[in-house]
Amino acid sequence: MKKIITIIFPLLLASGTFWANEPILSDETKVLLKEAKMQVEPVQAEKLKEWMVEQKIILLDVRDPDEWEKSTINYDRQVKISRGFLEIKYPKLILDKYTKEDTFVVYCALEPRSVFAAQRLKQLGFKHVIYLEGGLKKFNP
């Protein structure tokens, strides 16, 4: 076992696939992601930081609870809503405080979940939904 770890660990590090540097997506998921990106706009981390200072947006963290405990973006106008429960919990977690007319920036660790969540929110009638390009990794490099 030690020999396998000694051989594989450096290969994983060199390939850039260890610790989720890039999500591993199926070909079908890549197509869906490309289609979703055509429906929602990205925002870069620096622009998002400006908007946060101006209090112009609401952040939606669509990661899972165990990820929230590790790191997050500190911001008063934020909703944590796991992507897996978005469709079920958005009325209570989002619409009790905000409206579908507000501007939302969705983020996750890297990007794909936030793109899909942003796309879904638009399908649910939210008017102004953007995703953080590159995810939390780009916001807190």
Image (cartoon, rainbow, N blue to C red):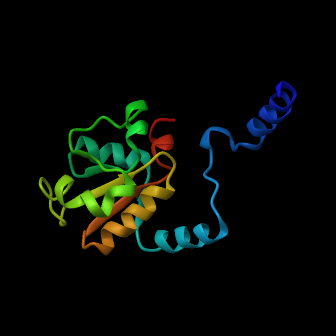
x then y, percent, for residue 139? 44, 41
Q: Is residue 13 above or below residue 50?
A: above
Q: Residue at x 81, y 38 (%)?
A: 11
Name the image quarter holding residue 99: bottom left
x then y, percent, for residue 135? 47, 48
Q: Residue at x 69, y 44 (%)?
A: 17
x then y, percent, for residue 92? 17, 56
| Tally of marks | 0
Name the image quarter holding residue 116: bottom left
Q: Nearer the viewer, residue 107 or 28?
A: 28
Q: Is residue 49 above or below residue 127?
A: above
Q: Is residue 33 above or below residue 20?
A: below
Res 103 seen here: no
Q: Is residue 68 above or below residue 131?
A: above
Q: Residue at x 66, y 69 (%)?
A: 27
| Lateral position of residue 112 relative to residue 96, left or right | right
Res 100 seen here: yes
| Lateral position of residue 77 relative to residue 61, left or right | left
x then y, percent, for residue 130? 36, 61
Q: Residue furthest top?
A: 2
